[in-house]
Each structure stands twice: as C-alpha cells, then as structure tokens.
Image: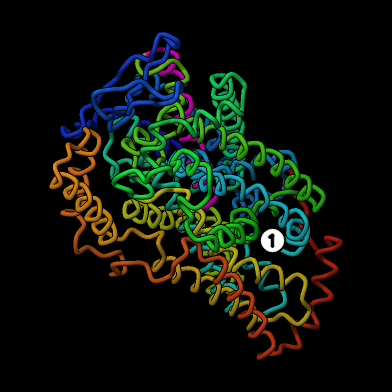
Amino acid sequence: MFINILSSLMLTLLLTTVGFTTEPPKSAPQATITAPASAPAMQVAVPAQSQGAAVASPAPASGVPTKIKPNRTITISMFSTIIGITLCVVIWAARQTKSASDFYTAGGGITGLQNGWAIAGDYMSAASFLGMSGLISLYGIDGFMYAVGPMFSFIAILLVIAEPCRNAGKFTLGDILSFRTAPKPVRAVAAVSTVTVSLFYLIAQMVGAGKLMQVLLDIPYRVSVVGVGVLMVGYVVFGGMKATTWVQIIKAGLLMSGTVVLAFLVISKAGFNPVGFFTDIVGNQLIQDHVRMNVLKDALPKPGFDYGQRFMEPGLFLKNPLDQISLGIAWALGAAGLPHILMRFFTVPSAKEARKSIVIALFINSSFFFLINIIGFGAALYLSPQLISSVDKGGNMATLLLAQLLGGGAGSLGGDMFLAFICAVAFATILAVVSGLVLAASAAIAHDVYVNIVMDGKADQHTQVKVARITSLFVGLAAILMGLAAEKENVVALVALAFAVAASGNFPAVMLSLFWKRFNTAGVISALLVGTLSALALVVISPVMTYPQKIADDAKKIVSTLEKKQAEGAVLAEKDLKQLDKSRKDYEKNNGGTSMVGLKAAIFPLKNPGIVSVPMGLIAAILGTLLFRDKRAEEMFDEIEVRQITGLGISKASDH
C-alpha cells in the first residue's frame, strides 16, 4: 500500500511540474546564435565579445541568456526513465527490508565491489558534478583545488578508518564512539554532530536539485526544492539501505559514463592538444574580461597585467594562502568523519570487503575528479564565464551548458539529447546522495537517540524501523527548509563546509576512540562539541557567507571609477556601460544589508575553517581526556582493539 501511494505521488509530481512556467527577465533577452563556419553544428547562446578574442572563443551575440532551453519532451522522458528505474529498485528493496539491520545496513550483505561503487555514488555529489566544474569555469585554478582535494581524502579512510570501523561498529557513528564510553551522553552528542554534517551536505544537494529543475522545466526554485525533496525522501522511507545502495550504484555508473563522454568531447574539440587548450584559455578575451571586472573588480585594465594568465594562478577564489591549506585539511580528513561514508562500512560482510570497497571507490573518484577539471576549463573556454554566471551566479549550470553545446548546440537533436542525459544523471546523483544522507541522519536520531537513549535499547525491530522512517521524514523536511534559504550559494562551497565540520569533530573522535587507550567519554564529547561548534561558528562569520554591504561597496568602487572616467570626457565602451548600470543596481539593492547573522563584513578571514577548527577539536579531545580520566574506558581498550583487528563479535551478514 505504501509503495502504491509513493508511486502515485511521484507520477503526480512529475506530471504537475510540466505545468509551471516562468518568464525570463525582460532586462536580459535571450540570444541564440550560430557558431562560425568552422563548427557548423554548434549553436550556443553567448554574451557579447570584445576585440582580439582567441580563436576558441564564442562568437559575439547581441544579448546575454538567462537560462538553458532544453527540449521539454526529451528531458521529461529521461527524468521519467530514471524515476521509473529507481522506483523499481525501491519496490524490490522494500519487500526485503524487515529488520533494523536491513533498513540501516542492508543486512551487511553488500559485496566489496558493490559497496565501492555505492561509496563512489555517495561521494560524487551534485556539488562535485555541478559545483566544482562551475568553480573552475569562474575561478580557474582555485576551482581545481576543490576538485583534486577529494582524491586524497580516501587515503585516510583506506589506511586508518575502514577496517577498524567495520569491526568496531554496528549501524552508526554513535556505535563506534560509545563502545567503551558512557553510551547515552556520547550517543546524544554523536547524533547532533551526525545530523549537523548531514544537513550541510543535504543543503548542497537540495540547492543543486532546485536549480536543476528550475532551469530545465521552468519550475520556480521553491517548488522545485519542495517537490524534489518529497520525491527523494520517499526512497529512503520505503527502501532503506538496500534501495539506497543500488540507486547509488546505478547513479555512479551513469555519472561516470556521462563525465567520460563530456571530457572526451572537450579534449577532442581542443584537438587532443593540452598545451594549445590552456594557451587558448589564457588568450581568451572573455576570460580576461571576467577576471578583470567580475573577480578582481578592476574597472579599468592595469597596464601590462595579464588577466588571462591570472586565471591560471591561485588566489581568485581562495585569496588567502592559508585558505588553500585549510581547504586541504578539510578535504583530507573530512571524508573519514562523514557519517554517511562511515555507515557504508557496516553494509559489507567483512573487513576485507571494506578495504576492497575503498580501493574501488578511490579509483572511481580519482578518475571522476580528474575529468571534472577538464570539463570546468572547457566550459570557461567554449562558453565563457560571463555566459555561465548569467545563467547561474554560482556557476552550477556550467556542465549542463557545455553538454548542450558539445552535443550539437541549442535546438539540435544531439544537443538536446546530451543535455537531457546529463541532466538526468545529475538528478540521479542528487537522488542517490540525498538518500544516503537522510539515512545517516535518521539512523543517528532513531538508533542512537530513540532506541538506545529513550528506550534503553529495548525497542523491537518493528518499532525501530517505524521510528527510522518517521525520522527520515523530519530530516527531509529540515533539508527542504534549509535548501530554500540557501538558493544563492554555490553548492561545492557548502559541501566543503560539511567536510570541515566532519574533520573538526568526528574525525578526531573516531581516530582517538580506536587508537588511544586513555581516550574516554569526556574526550569524545569535547571533540564533538568543540570541533563541530567551532567550525560552525567560524563559518557563519567567514567570507563564504553572503554580505550585501560588501557587494554594495565593491559596486560603488566601480561606479566611482567609471563615472570619473566619464567626467573626464571619455566615452565608455558598451561593456563598460553595462557594467556601470549593473553596479548602480547592485549598490542600490545591497547598500545597508547584512548577512544572515547580522554582519556587514566577515570577521574570520578564511573561507574554510579547517586550519583552526580541526586543531581545536583535537586539542579539546586530548584535554578532555586528560582532565577527566576514566579507568573503565582504559580497561575496555583491549577488547575494542581485538575486535577491530580480528572482527570478533561482529554480527554476520544476512542472506539477501
């Protein structure tokens, strides 16, 4: 009955979305033009171009587009196919999900190969696919830093965390941390940390989902977030870990296929010449204009300054060198503290399979993030940063625009088909990642808080599964509400913050629980509270937040410079006139505004808090342990050491 209701809801949602439309802003008319004769099949909407652009630059146009124009029939068909396939998986999984073990860990019966693809599916999020390529297309090498960082995070998991966690835990982060500590307070704090990290990650996925549906089907952002949120939560409520795992495997296969094809098309368009490819990027006039006016905020060019070369140097997005280090720390250690990644170790039957799954995931993820760099730089060259930011200020639509261009252009069958496929893959990506995150958050609340704290571990299997499903609904609702509030944020920045929170609190707690004999309850709670709260506190006062007053101040500088030039008798070029008009509007709109916590400017100078919050979490863990010694925790260390090495006492996989 529940499955029938879910099926009807999803079909209704899909059909009703077709009816929503929004008019493009009249101030920015769309302009679709045909590329030069050298590429007769290419059609793309592009902004006006200055003199002297590189050969690979887009052709000039009379206007700037504000959205992608996909073929509605093809796109809905692709989406329907994805929904249909995943619905079948949910129905199949729901029939086999009877116990708490089935719901949380698929009974521990997932193989290492399957789990490796599922972990890759969990890790290759909408932030990776949409946000990272967008950052690269807008900020060059700084976006590249975001893309290569995740490659190294799995080394910490592979070498340190995977096998001990599989042998020492059961369902959640709280299971690992509470084994030799006071279980109730530790589980409570671990649940709060898990939900916090999961929600940060969830927000990024919800923003990506909302943008995707808004752009493709002309559905208002708010309706998109609510609709997609309802759809995706349904998968977890009915299918549990079994459905989540197979949705992630399907999604990972589709995503890798689309990424490989798109990167290959970029390389082939560049004549398989990487040197020429990056030379064209440096010489592209539109990229130079973007770096000068939109990034460095230079109203007039500096004599002798190479803005194209600046695009290939660090510091456009992460302006402080410490930000680079801070981001690296968060990436390297954060994945080892992500609850939905740790949870996947409990789905395999042995530690050997856990290690195998990480090796497979590492290979898949490394290949994916390498290709994302090619796609991001290709988008900057063949589309222009101006076009990308005109469609979405955060750059989240860069991959989709590039797919349409390289598939044949706007209006062509090839362009519409490839765009629809990539969009469907992005939708499946969001679907899979959100499923894992909702499951991790609901497990923390239902298993750690309700079953082990409220019910003292005495809840029956039916009640545990029922509570987990109800909790999933509330977690999904929270994600929807927060996604609505984060509409203007770049999704990859939000994921980086989730990594920072996980690295600051969860990682020190897990590491020291497994490998330090004296570590105790006070140490766990200190690590989780100080690490998590310090990361969050630094985030809300950092430059990653939106500060309207800073936008107004930057706009005022440009207005003053260009008005002074006019007063001196100079005639402004068309692009400078547009910049002047835009800056005046930005100033009027944002002057006097504050951030969500009431600040006019950032107090903490770094965009990522890892360099401060990670040491704070680690120091707090050590001090808490040394100040409040616990003999019981020390005495039980030998038992957990034997368990994590041998797997003794671990429940066996059920037959699925």
Question: Horizontal and vertical percent for residue 325?
Answer: 59, 61
**Which residues make up the magenta segment?**
412-438
Left or right for 76, reference 103: left
Please tell me whether residue 424 belongs to the stretch shown in magenta.
Answer: yes
Compared to 399, does 196 lie above or below?
below
- The colour scheme applied to this rendered structure is rainbow
Q: Pointer 1: what residue?
A: 170
Is residue 79 at all visible to an observer of this figure?
no
Answer with the quarter of the image where residue 122 lies: top right
The total of numbered circles placed on residues is: 1
The stretch drawn in magenta includes residue 397: no
Type of the residue with mark 1: Lys
How many C-alpha atoms fall within 10 Å of the one at disc 1: few (<14), some, or many (≥20)?
many
Percent across and percent down for residue 557 are: 25, 55
Residue at 66% x, 73% y is: 178
Task: Residue 177 in the image: state x and y as whole percent.
Answer: 66, 71
Badge 1 element: loop
Rendering coords of residue 371 (x, y %): 60, 34
Q: Quadrant of the C terminus?
A: top right
The answer to whether 456 is drawn above or below residue 147 in the figure is below
| Image point (63%, 83%), residue name | 522
The residue lying toward the viewer, choosing from 578 and 452, is: 578
